Image (spheres, rainbow, N blue to C red):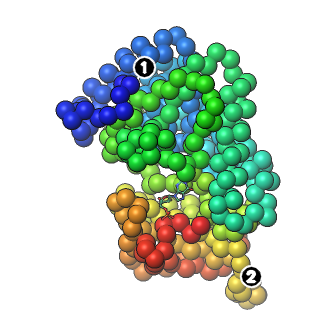
Amino acid sequence: MSSNVRPETMERITNKALAEVFIENQVKEIREQVGDKKVLLALSGGVDSSVVAALLIKAIGKQLVCVHVNHGLMRKGESEQVIEVFGKELDANLIYVDATDRFLDLLTDVSEPEKKRKIIGGEFIKVFDEEASKLEGISFLAQGTIYPDILESDGVKAHHNVGGLPEDMQFELVEPVKLLFKDEVRVVGETLGLPHDMVYRQPFPGPGLGVRCLGAITRDRLHALREADAILREEFDKNGLAGKVWQYFVAVPDFKSVGVRDGKRYEGWAAIIRAVNTTDAMTATIEEIPYPLIHHITDRITHEVDGINRVMVDVTPKPVGTIEFE
Ligand code: XMP
């Protein structure tokens, strides 16, 4: 599939039967392209790279080398799921790099959002490059480019995504889902047997929790954010909102307010809940979370998460707010 133009006759992949035909064709094409050579893939655990990984594992098995870089800014359980699904269940050739300390050390005292993004993106490339240079005999680089990436940014995978890779890497590209739209990638992923929550997950920015731990990131506040966010996600899942709301998350600002706990003054951070709906992320409206659920989530976060003593709900649409805070 070398052309970057989706043929007008290409049928939209809306069900498993169509996905199976696509998968069969891709497996054949990938085998033809790659032969007995090795392919490298940066596997973030997001929808696109996960589906590409699953397709390539089906086509060429251990000739695919997946590198998962944990930058320490993943949501709770995400890296563990990558290891479980790809390392164990699919028995992939998976290199797991826990680079948490490298990223968090570099981010110490950095509060400017674009600087944070630059550091995270730059360090990601460095870590990935280092891992790639330890490997021998790699001829191809697989990427989770999808059709909107081609339409919107001249084929460059999500220009501001941390998944961006070194431009000087001299590999031939393998991009098996580059003519598919997101909904089609999801159907293909599910047909390949990937977990539903992995394939239907909400969008997550490349810099991860780094742009939701507002201001200069500290390890204790990042931990509190991760735990609070996990509670929000769990409650949205239990209450049927997870598949319905486009994006929902917690942000934790870098100031404390006074509260009381067990009859004592207790200073803590605030967890801000944001849940939005959109079709293209250019504008967004607010999901009206039922108040009883807000009360329940507040109760859980303030009791279960160390360091948080207040919960707020952000009801600002985009515009005038952006979806993320930074
Ligand atoms: P904003 O905050 O600009 O977000 O309204 C629009 C969409 O883009 C995502 N986003 C990012 N994604 N790297 C990414 O890969 C980033 O640096 C980044 N910043 C925002 C955001 O989560 C939302 O879906």
Q: Is residue 159 visible?
A: yes
Name the secondary structure under disc 2.
Answer: strand
Image side of residue 221 versus residue 205, left or right:
right
Dot 2, crowdedness within 10 Å: few (<14), some or many (≥20)?
some
Q: Quadrant of residue 81?
A: top right
Q: Earlier in the sequence, mark 1 or mark 2?
A: 1
Q: Is residue 51 above or below residue 56?
A: below
Residue 47, image x and y in percent? Answer: 45, 43
Left or right: residue 44 compared with residue 117: left
Q: Residue at x 67, y 35 (%)?
A: 128
Q: On the picture, is 236 further left or further right than 312?
A: left
Up the image or down, 317 lies above or below 6; here it is: below
The residue that mark 2 highlights is 267
Query: Would you name the residue on which mark 1 appears?
Result: 30
Which disc, if any, is residue 112?
none
Residue visible at 43% across and 72% down in the picture: 318
Q: Residue at x 50, y 33 (%)?
A: 143
The answer to whether residue 15 shows anywhere in this view is: no
Quadrant of the rendered image containing residue 114: bottom right
**Badge 1 vs badge 2, beta-carbon distance below 8 Å:** no
Q: Is 81 placed above or below 20 here? A: below
Q: Nearer the viewer, residue 257 or 177?
A: 177
